[in-house]
Each structure stands twice: as C-alpha cells, then as structure tokens.
Amino acid sequence: MFECGTCGKEFPAGWRARENHYKSTGHLPPAFECDTCDAWFRSNNAKWQHMAVKNHFAWRCRDPDCEQTWPTEEQLKEHEIEDHYLCNKCDRYFSNLNNIRMHLRSRDHIGEQSVQCPFCKTSYTTATGLVHHLEHGFCPSAPFLNRDDIYRYVRSKDPGGLISKKLIGWNGDSDDHYEATAMAWNGAAYECYFCHKAFGRLTALNQHLNSGTHRQNLYDCPKAGCRKDFQTLAAVISHLESESCGAVRFDTVQKNIADIVSGGRAIGFR
C-alpha cells in the first residue's frame, strides 16, 4: 500500500490519491521508495537490490515479449537498439538485423541527399552508389572518369594505404584489351588462360577477358583480420557498408566518402 513519507498516511486507493495528498499538503514520498511499486526501504542500496531482483526499474522495454526494466532511459534505448533492432532516429522496431540494416541504408532513413556527386550534383543514398556512378563513367558531367582515375585520386587521399594497394610500377589498365584466338580451343571449349573457365564460343571468351574479371586488385579491406581484396573502389565501399567484418560502421563510411569527394580530408574512416 502506498504511504506518505512525511506523515505515514496510507492510501488504499493507490498512488494517484497519494499524489493529490502531496499537492495539498506539500508532503513527500518515502526517501527510498521503489520506482514502480509501493515498497520502500531504509537505504538506497536496499531499494536498488529490490528493484534489480523484482525487475522494478522505471524504464520498461516496450516489446511485450520482453518487458525488461532499466534504471535510465539511456540504458533502455541501448537495450532496445541492440536486442530489439530499434531505429532510434525513426522510433521503429524491426524483426531482425538484416531488416534494420536495409532500413538504415534506405531513403526513408538517410534522406534524399546523402552523398552528392561533385560534378553533376546527383544525390545517392549510399557511398557505393556514388562511387559506382563515377568509377564506371556514368556521370554526364565527367564521362572521362574511369577506374584508373578514381584509383589515382584515392591514392592521393590515402598515403598510408589504408584501403588502396601500393602497386609499384602500376600505370593503369582501363585501356587494356584482350583478344583470344582459335589457339584458346582445348579440344572441347575455348579456355580462359587466366582462370581456365571454358566457353562454347570465342566471342564469349573475349567478353569474359575484357569484362574486368581479371583486372588487378587495387583495394583491400582496412581491417587487419580481413584484408579482403577488391578490384574497384565501389566494391570495397560496399563491403565496408555491409559491416560484414565490422571494420567500420555504415554511417562512418557515408561521412568519410562525402568529405573525400568534396576535395577535403584524407581517408581515415574514423
């Protein structure tokens, strides 16, 4: 039963009746009262022990299947974000980790103008979209750009080789063109000299050779325990955005790429 901490009066009708009593008298609740029930104690330590055992903290998880309570709103939010896939910005819950990751990368969450092309001013919701746009010569205001140009620019912004490989003697390979001949026939199919993949037609083999499949890897993941190789900047950025190896958070990738393409900072991903 709720009790006044000043005069000891009890309130069978509940805490609302006691609140009215406080307003009219100026009295106060017991010094060490539980945040959610009528129990009170002679020390703060006893109060906290009670609330921990009874799950009686003031901030309760909104998931009906959980209802865990927490001492502060910050701790509750941390719990809901980590254990219940809460988007704190949108105040939305998701059923699994993959769904919230997709949401965090969507226009609904990021907005219409996340990363902007420095040439044509087209906006992209992810850094991967922008880099792919530039790296493949799709920008109408900079159609001359290609994979090699982007690599040279990244190297200038990445002197420590965080994501770009230091390729001694590299002069670019975007203009390389391979032409297989009838000599590629192995008796059953046309065979790729590099990977030994077989093709039924010579034209198919030549398409394969000039698709970029066997181009040199220019980038790698910055995480020491990963270091996966990639041929394009878009590929390594997509890898980082996925958070698959935990090298860096998605939002950090967006911010860093936006700063880099605007001509600002060096690559750091911090």
Image (cartoon, helix red, strand yellow):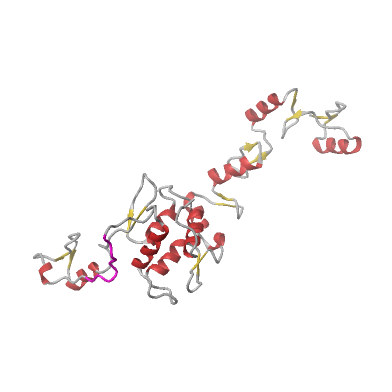
The residue located at (37%, 70%) in the rendering is: 136
262 lies above or below 82: below
Region rendered in magenta? 169-177
Q: Is residue 92 magenta?
A: no
Residue 83: x and y in percent read 54, 43
Quarter holding the N terminus is top right
Left or right relative to 51: residue 173: left
Residue 242: x and y in percent read 43, 54
194 lies above or below 122: above
Left or right relative to 156: residue 74: right
Seen from the viewer's position, the closer of residues 12 and 269 is 269
Principal secondary structure, stretch drawn in magenta:
loop
The residue located at (63%, 45%) in the rendering is: 62
Residue 167: x and y in percent read 29, 57
**Extreme-left residue of the structure:** 187
Q: Quadrant of residue 84?
A: top right
Left or right relative to 150: residue 213: left
Residue 97: x and y in percent read 48, 49
